[in-house]
Every structure is written in structure tokens, then in C-alpha cells.
Image (tube, rainbow, N blue to C red):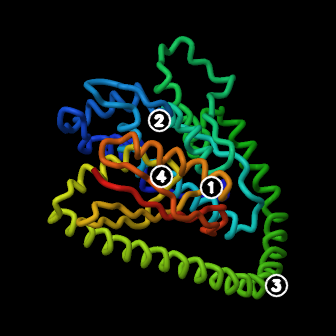
Amino acid sequence: LEFVRYIPVGSGNITEAMTGSLTLENGSMELTKDEAEKLKMRLGISYEDEIVDKGITSRQILSLMRSTLERLSKEIKRSMDYYTQEYGAEPISAVYLIGGGALLKNLDRFLSEELNIQVKLLELPRSVDISKAHLNNKDSASLIPLISAVLGYKKCLNLLPHEYRQEKIEFIEKISLRMIAIIMGLILLASFLFIKFRAEDYKNRLKNATLQKTILDQIKDLQDRVVERSAFLSQARMSDIPLEYIMKELSIIIPPNVVLNSLGVNQKSKTLDVKGIIYEPRGLAEGILTKFMEAMERSRYFKDAQLASVQDATIGREPSSSFEMSCLLE
């Protein structure tokens, strides 16, 4: 292993995200943690809009999970970018998923689309026979981390006979003088490399400082968005238009790769102005936005959706497009 990092998002966070409030035709409801876990394991990340249970659709379930799934993909992408920059390695070509949470349906497909690389489930080695253990798929998937832990355990019980252990001690004594000579040579080599290492260390510090500055800029931008949206929500609670239901409706019909930056509501003219980013080149972005507007017009809250502009934008290394659109509120 060259690089290990723990990320603060896992399968349990997806279940907690699904316990949020859902808007149905006859009212609203909230899933319990047990109900959310069962729906998550049965449905997974669904790419088809269908009724799952009690009037709940798979698209609504996906809308609850989306923010947590996007956090997961961003944390993985951040780890990959840091590894490539820190170690100067070639770009990562594949991601393998292990553990019980990796069995979430279509998780590999979702991460593959978000990270734009190949994502697969890591299977048990063929040399491991679990046919007599009567394990289900979740248990067998959880065996892989356990096997890796066992393979890395070095302080195990020595059951060799005494004569074999004594022979090993004598062999160590024979090579001790050679090892001392080698160690002295390594010490001299280390003294030569120390100055070079210090120079590389200063370069790495400069690189890390640049990366930290970028992260701080992103945090400031996020803080500004939070303040802006908090002010918007405060105003929305005082308005006559049911903006809470309008925003929930937008969260259901919005395409996966579209992010809204701002919403503007005119109470007098009952119009909605939308600005956002779509993580696709301009050619594909126009088609996705057309479907988005058609979905808005099929909703009971929006009509006469019009696209004002679509422009190329650059966010990180991914091609993206910014857009502005408006519609009437019913």
C-alpha cells in the first residue's frame, strides 16, 4: 500500500439520509431507519422512475440519497487527486469496492459515472473456499477486509520445533557482521540523501500550501452559498407561494449532473429564475436541460419553462456549462 485515507462517508450515512421527509400526493411521510435500510438494500441506486411502496417512487428515494452519494464520490475523487499530486504517480485507472456496503445496487455504476473511471466489486480469491460456510452475499463480501487484515498480521504463534528455531538463530548470527557493514554503508548514503530530501520536502510543502489555499477558497465559496440560501429560505417562509413544495419538486425532477447555484422568485409576477451548473460539455448540456424543462412543465407547479442562456464553464478539470432559465409558477 502506498496511500491510506479514511473518508467520513459510508453506508450508514446513506441510510440516515433516507430518513428525511418525503412529499407524496396525499401528504408527506418520513421513513424509519429500519424501513430506509430495507428499501436501500432492495432498491439500491435506481435509474428508473417507478413506484416502490406506499406511493413512494424510486426517484424520490434517489433524491434523498443523492447528496450523501455525491459526498462519497467527491471524497474518493479528492483522495485520488491528492495521491496523484503528492506521489507524482500516473492517473488511477480503476477503483475496487469491498465490504458489505459495496453490495448497494448500482453503486459501482454511480461511482463510475461520477469519477469517470472503471469501478468494480472486488471478488473473493478463488483459493478461498466458502461453500461449506453457508454465507450470504453480504457476509462473503465482508470477508475480504478480514482476509487482508489476517495476511498483514506478522506477530503470529511460532509452532516450529526447537531445532529449526535454533538453526534460524545461528543463521542470523552468521549474517550479523554483514548486516553491520551494510548498515554503516546505508548510514553514509543516508547522510548524502538527507540534504536532497530536505530540498524535496520544501517543494512538497509549497505544493501542499497551494492545495490548502484552494481548499480554503472552496470553503469560503461554500459559506457564501450557505448564507445566501439561508436568506432565501427565510424570505421563502414569509411568501404566499408554497416555495417549500416547489423546492422539493425541483429536487425530485432535477437531473443527476445539474447543480443549482441560485433561485429567484418574483411574488408579483409569479416567476422563477434559475441559475446553475451542469457537469457536461455544452453540446450535451442543451439536451439535458431540454428534458429538465419538459419535466418542469409536466409538474403541477411550473409552466412555460424557457432557457435563457447556456455557456461553457470550467470547474476543475471537468468540462461543464453554466445556464440560466425561467418559468411561471402555478
Q: Which residue is mark 1?
A: 280
Question: Is 145 on the left-hand or right-hand side of 282?
Answer: left
Can residue 142 be seen here? The reply is no
Q: Are marks 2 and 1 in contact (CB under 8 Å)?
A: no
* Sequence-wise first label, 4 or 1: 4
Say what secondary structure mark 4 lies in.
Answer: helix
* Sequence-wise first label, 2 or 4: 2
Residue 249's tag is none
Please name the residue shown 80% across and 74% down the image: 186
Residue 192's tag is 3
* Sequence-wise first label, 3 or 4: 4
Please say if 42 is above or below 29.
above
Residue 70's tag is 4
Q: Quadrant of residue 16?
A: top left
Please say if 192 is above or below 269.
below
Tell me the CA gap for discs 3 and 2: 55 Å
Please name the residue shown 69% across and 23% down the image: 126
Residue 64 coordinates in the image, percent (x, y): 35, 44
Tell me the CA gap for discs 4 and 1: 16 Å
Residue 23 coordinates in the image, percent (x, y): 25, 40
Residue 45's tag is 2
Question: Is 184 on the left-hand or right-hand side of 285?
Answer: right
> Of the residues shown, which amino acid type is indicated by label 3?
Phe
Please name the residue shown 73% across and 49% down the image: 93
* Mark 3 or mark 2, whichever is nearer to me: 2
Judging depth in this view, the residue of 119 and 154 nearest the camera is: 119
Circle 3 packing at 10 Å, graded few (<14), some (14-19), many (20+), is few
